[in-house]
Amino acid sequence: MSLHKILKVVFGRVVFTLLCILVQILWLVSLWTAFSEYSVLCTVILEAIAVIVVIRINSRSEYSAARLLWTAVILAFPAFGLCLYSMFGRRGITRTVKRRYDQVHRTFIPYLLPKEDILEELRENNIYIHNQLKYIQTTSTFPVYKNTSVKYFPLADEALVSMLEDLRNAKEFIFMEYFAIEDAECWHMIEEVLLEKIAQGVEVRLIYDDFGSIAFVKPEFMKRMNKKGIKCRVFNPLVPLVYAFMNHRDHRKIMVIDNKISYSGGFNMADEYFNINPPYGHWKDSGIRMEGDAVKSHTIMFLQMWNNILQTDKDYTPFLNPYSRKIDTAAGYVLPYSDTPLDNNTLGENVYMNIIKNATDYVYITTPYLILDTEMEKELCMAAQRGIDVRIITPNIPDKKAIFLLTQSYYNKLIRSGVRIYQYTPGFMHAKNYVCDDKIGVVGTINMDYRSLYLHFECATYLYDTEAVLDIKRDFEETLLKCHEITLEDCLRRKLHTRIYQAILRLIAPMV
């Protein structure tokens, strides 16, 4: 990280928030000291609260490793554990926030009618794919589409050129939603085009996550964008309070142009994703461009988030005009979907596990982080043991060293079961892709870690029998040539202190 970025963080909102939390903790300690003569009573009350919280945690259908960890920490250290859980462990939100999200979601139901004819066609051709897409459609409410062309980009650098061209051709509106925006070279190229389109009467809206962008933009960035005509909203601004919803971030990456074209994938609007001065070697990321009927789902995803932050749209129909052209080159089935932490359904993880569980030949995976719960680890191992060619590419140069060691801690068992693990030698692997049996592909924002699978707002696109699926496979095979395979001997050569550190990281993985 450059000195400029370090200074942004040191003097930015994160440190201010942490200092405020520290003040609150010190205040609680001083309060405890002031009432020291009632320490026995206070201890009993605190332990009773701890037991109630633990019972509540274990009554929910959450990640089993997380339940075990929080149970141990809270019961062993009630005061510390309860404070820690309130900041980093709670998945719940206030009733007011939940009510607002539910209300906005209901307003879009008329625009998300199931495509029963397409599902029936799938039922006749492939019952497994029918069942999988039916599950995604029922859970996420987003339907499966045909008449959609999909282009796969093996590098974000290539996607940027295409995005700029499509942005210049926008006629009605441009929607952009990103976890991270950097006020630097890449964004300035995009911004220049956006300002030209605004002058031509095109409506431009932008959403970015406050935490994801905290090292990249100053607090006044939103005001500056709004002043220029780019309607801008910040998702979940950081506030110096112990507030459960701070734990949920908008990790999605979506660009929509006129409800006709959309982009999504692993890359944010920051220079490193496009290999402009990348800090961790070559940055390997990917994404897709869609044109056609399925773009409507990305438009709705954006509008849902826009109105969740502040509901201002009264009529969505101007943004949802049907795609009017028949695409001759479109083949296969496309289902863009979003995953939300506001329900108890881990859709992102379930889609991944269903692919692994039903594979008949191979499953190839690229992911920056490999932090597995028991169920996912079991599915990967069983797939390899029944003869499926399971291969996973992870980074060779980490962006977070502790997370990298945690990722490597899972290698041993996977390799022993027959899973083949590779590390991307030139740098950092950030793509989140699945490809299976030459027929199934998933490209999106969903990492294989606890935060993506359980805490963040995410999105991905399920592809079946499209040409892009073979492009994803081809990219994986070409990327393998730039990787080195991790062997069991590599795992066993790790020093004892490294293994101990990894064991500790495994214990606290749900907090990472």
Image (tube, helix red, strand yellow):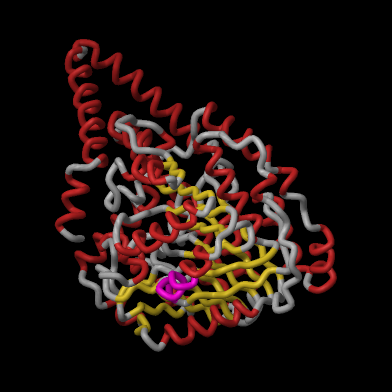
Say whether residue 158 is magenta: yes
Residue 387 seen in the figure: no
Q: Is residue 320 left or right of residue 62?
A: right
Q: Residue at x 72, y 43 (%)?
A: 109
Q: Nearer the viewer, residue 249 or 497?
A: 249
Up the image or down, 237 lies above or below 489; here it is above
Number of marks: 0
Percent across and percent down for residue 456 are 47, 49
Percent across and percent down for residue 336 are 62, 60
Up the image or down, 345 lies above or below 419; here it is above
Percent across and percent down for residue 326 are 76, 70
Q: Residue at x 64, y 35 (%)?
A: 314
Up the image or down, 43 lies above or below 388; here it is above
Q: Quadrant of residue 479?
A: bottom left
Name the magenta segment's main secondary structure: helix
Up the image or down, 122 lies above or below 134; here it is below
Percent across and percent down for residue 316 are 66, 43
Q: Quadrant of residue 178?
A: bottom left
Q: Is residue 160 left or right of residue 380?
A: left
- Which residue range is magenta in the image? 155-162
Say whether residue 11 is magenta: no
